Image (cartoon, grey):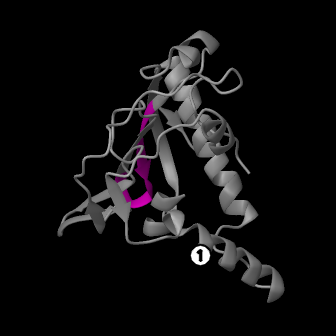
Amino acid sequence: ALVRWLTGRKISTVDAVTSNFFFQEHEQAGVEDFGIMIMDLEGGVSATIAAGRFGWTSHPAGGPLKIVLVGANGTFTFDAHNPKFELHTDEAPFAMPERHSLDPMGMWASTQRESNVMRKNRWQSFDQDPPGQLADVSAFINSIENDVEPEMNVRLAASLAEVILAGYESAANGYSVKLPLVEH
């Protein structure tokens, strides 16, 4: 969604790979926990997206939230963890929690509380709004109350679902997938 929003261009071709690197439970269930998607957009623009899970001890804040834009005129980096306080204290280092039977990978806040997962306090963000969630909710409510078409509308969401489907098709079969998948 971010690539489409930033460029205003449709995605024309997708190449993707997925794998299981971080959690044995994902591998046993045949579910990926890492993926890379390379996209060609209208007008010769290309974009690469990498996403994956991070192990408990791999990152001081649970994983990076970073976007790097590289263009003909320069590079821009956005990091949701910046600005931040980086704390060095005598606090005990992070320790692996007991596995929760309903959430062995510790993905949900409710089971993390039940398992007494230690907070990772080494990085503290200045921003108390988890990356833009309050702004997203406010924009959604505004579009309903004022009968205004949101930036993320049904047509755009459907086209993005098609990109994700093309990514899975590419990863499963090892070839580039052209969009749209079905002529509209």
Whether residue 29 is situated above or below residue 154 in the rendered picture: above
**Left or right: 158, with 60 as reference point:** right
Q: Which residues are magenta?
A: 35-46
| Quarter holding residue 180 | top right
**Left or right: 46, with 26 as reference point:** left
**Left or right: 9, with 74 as reference point:** right
Q: According to the image, label 1 marks what residue?
A: 135
Whether residue 148 is situated above or below residue 36 in the rendered picture: below
Extreme residue toward the front, this view: 90
Closest to the observer: 32 or 166? 32
Whether residue 27 is situated above or below residue 78 in the rendered picture: above
The structure residue drawn at horizontal position 45% and vertical position 30%, both measured from the top left corner, is: 34
The structure residue drawn at horizontal position 22% and vertical position 52%, both measured from the top left corner, is: 88
Whether residue 94 is in magenta: the answer is no
Q: From this viewpoint, is residue 128 visible?
A: yes
Q: What amino acid is labelled 1 in the image?
A: Ala
Q: Position of residue 159 (x, y in %)?
A: 65, 53
| Quarter holding residue 156 | bottom right
- The chief SS type of the magenta part is strand
**Left or right: 149, with 37 as reference point:** right
The structure residue drawn at horizontal position 36% and vertical position 32%, both measured from the top left corner, is: 57
The structure residue drawn at horizontal position 63% and vertical position 41%, both measured from the top left corner, is: 113
| Quarter holding residue 87 | bottom left
Closest to the observer: 70 or 139? 139
Q: Quadrant of the N terminus?
A: bottom right
